Amino acid sequence: QVRLVESGGGVIQPGRSLRLSCVASGFSFGTSVMHWVRQAPGKGLEWVAATSYDETTKHYVDSVKGRFTISRDNSKNTLFLQMNSLRAADTAVYFCTRFGPKFDDLGHNYFFDQWGQGTLVVVSS
Amino acid sequence: EIVMTQSPATLSVSPGARATLSCRASHYVSRNLAWYQQRPGQAPRLLIYGATTRATGVPDRFSASGSGTDFALTISSLQSEDSAIYYCQQYHDWPPLTFGGGTKVDIK
């Protein structure tokens, strides 16, 4: 059974740093493309960052480039999001998610088949 | 960036009725589209991928159609547990992966 458990959220002042973690179990974490998706209070879903299985390729939404860093430790089945220079606009629930092993008819699997429950980050003075 | 637009923002329907939700992409996305259901206080759940394929365990009252730029999710015979926000997501051209703003389905 696939499980993704996020932690590390909390209340943090603007300009400070926070590191989120996501521990994965029940699947081959070390071969999976992993992501962070966030949801501001009462708002929709926003993809934040992605990392390939070996960290050779990483992508970020423009609003976090240069401030957030996604990383992983495959030996510990753990995904991280280092968040620096936090802003009020970064306040959100952060979900850990993955591209799963199923492919569509076009041979693509760039959709999120499993999600964690999320960890809340509140940036406020 | 491909912008996804969902309509309506809110849909209020009676139990047992049918609901049709729309999703439009600002650019061609072929059939590289997924739908998610998010119940209050929960994480999103994958419903549909490849524009029309139901994910594992999704009831067959959920169906989807479309390709190119216009897509629809239909929930036939609505049940109380279908009360949720539904999001579409394109994966044709990324980064970034982009979601629609969501449609809230209320069961009257």
Image (spheres, coloured by chain):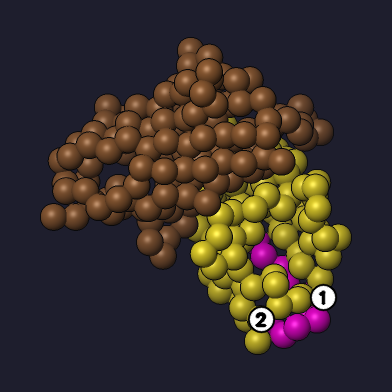
Chain colours: A brown, B yellow
Segment colored magenta: B13-24
Seen at 27% across and 27% down, the residue is A66
Subunit ID for the residue under disc 2: B
Q: Amino acid at mark 2?
A: Ile
What whole-number distance in Å separates the C-alpha atoms at marks 2 and 1? 11 Å
Subunit ID for the residue under disc 1: B
Question: Is B67 one of the magenta-colored residues?
Answer: no
Left or right of B52 in this view: A119: left
Res B30 quadrant in image: top right
Outermost residue to the front: A76
The quarter of the picture where the C terminus of chain B appears is: bottom right
| Image vertical order of residue A124 relative to residue B96, above or below | below
Residue B107 is labelled as 2
Outermost residue to the right: B60
First along the sequence among labels 2 and 1: 1
Q: Nearer the viewer, residue B1 or A40?
A: A40
